[in-house]
């Protein structure tokens, strides 16, 4: 319910504008979640409210039985157990926003636990590229001469080198780059999923040992076509012309990585927008980089999440942890 301000009395002619401060406070509270999160919350809430209406049940507030039955219905319709967590988060958010208490979730937790035991679902993780596969992709792109492929090469190599998520790669602007002679390029990242407050960080991308897979050279090649116009770094390409005022959509990255994987005979269903990030983590681990070093680059906040990103298809790759014991 909107607050009704009483008439403001001030001892002096100038004083704080309470109504304006209230508006500013409400505006600040409206950005407690990332924009993408709020879009997802609204979509999930709309689906829940529609389900409740069709079942003749109240959605706001809902009771624990309604919550349990809704989650059960989603699971029965094929939703993964992990996805139900975000449905619950959305429902909880709109209860909080209305000043209402979320109902007890004991029954929901039991339902989800039983479903996990029955299904034994394995998360669908995008595979990482090996060094040899990255080299083959780059060689294939170099032979194509397509400007779209030149952009894709820079995009994929920068993803592998920085470990950035596809949303962060596409959020980069030309102004975020600072080329350092004989060293590489410093990339300024304003914010990320693990940095919601936008403290930012700078990632140093060094010159590659091999010209064909050097991320810095690939980036310069893309800029030779894109130019140095301020704005989004990675743009859509229409009729072999970079649309420098438009920003590449994160979902497009997913498709372009699949195309790159398929170009060298890999199954595109196993690869996607997260593959470059997984390649960075896996490659760094195999090169002997410690967990803290990987976390510093990728922005992961827990060791467990770093472990999740290790996508090594070869069980014999890397150092032998029990070497010398047998």
Image (cartoon, grey):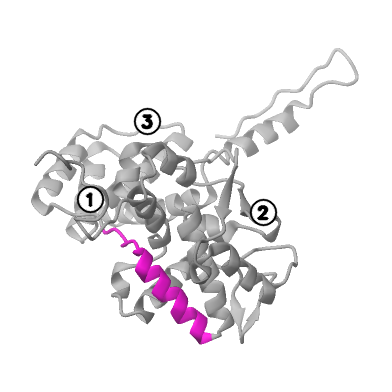
**Mark before the other along the chain sequence, 2 or 1:** 1
Q: Which mark is residue 199?
A: none
What whole-number distance in Å separates the C-alpha atoms at marks 3 and 1?
24 Å
Nearer to me, 254 or 151: 151
In this orientation, does residue 166 appear? no
- The x, y position of residue 98, in whole percent, is 47, 36
Report the residue at 60% width, 38% height from top.
199
For label 1, the residue is 81
Which residue sits furthest right?
A: 13
For label 3, the residue is 101
User: Compared with residue 57, is residue 103 higher up or lower down, i.e. above or below?
Assistant: above
For label 2, the residue is 176
Report the residue at 57% width, 69% height from top.
218
Q: Is residue 182 left or right of residue 267?
A: right
Q: Is residue 43 left or right of residue 113?
A: right
Q: What kind of element bears circle 3? A: loop
């Amino acid at each position: 319910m909107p607050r009704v301000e009483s008439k403001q009395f001030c001892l002096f002619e100038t004083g704080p504008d309470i109504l304006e401060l209230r508006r500013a406070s409400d505006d600040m509270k409206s950005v407690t979640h990332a924009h993408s999160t709020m879009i997802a919350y609204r979509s999930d809430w709309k689906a829940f409210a529609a389900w409740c209406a069709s079942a003749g049940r109240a959605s706001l507030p809902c009771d624990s039985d309604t919550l349990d039955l809704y989650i059960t219905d989603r699971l029965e319709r094929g939703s993964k157990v992990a996805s139900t967590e975000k449905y619950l988060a959305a429902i909880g958010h709109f209860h909080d926003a209305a000043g209402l208490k979320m109902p007890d979730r004991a029954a929901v937790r039991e339902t989800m636990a039983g479903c996990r035991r029955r299904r034994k679902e394995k998360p669908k993780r995008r595979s990482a590229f090996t060094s040899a596969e990255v080299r083959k992709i780059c060689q294939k792109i170099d032979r194509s001469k397509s400007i779209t492929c030149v952009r894709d090469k820079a995009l994929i190599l920068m993803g592998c080198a920085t470990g950035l998520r596809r949303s962060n790669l596409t959020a980069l602007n030309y102004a975020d780059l600072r080329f350092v002679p004989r060293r590489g390029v410093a990339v300024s990242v304003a914010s990320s999923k693990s940095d919601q407050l936008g403290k930012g960080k700078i990632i140093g991308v060094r010159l590659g040992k091999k010209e064909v897979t050097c991320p810095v050279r690939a980036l310069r090649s893309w800029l030779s076509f894109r130019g140095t116009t301020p704005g989004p770094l990675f743009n859509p390409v229409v009729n072999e012309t970079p649309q420098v005022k438009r920003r590449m959509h994160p979902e497009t990255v997913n498709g372009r990585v699949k195309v790159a994987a398929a170009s060298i005979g890999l199954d595109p269903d196993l690869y996607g927008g997260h593959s470059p990030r997984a390649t960075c983590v896996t490659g760094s681990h195999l090169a002997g980089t410690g967990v803290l070093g990987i976390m510093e680059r990728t922005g992961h906040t827990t060791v467990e999440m770093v472990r999740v990103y290790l996508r090594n298809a070869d069980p014999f790759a890397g150092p032998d942890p029990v070497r010398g014991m047998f």
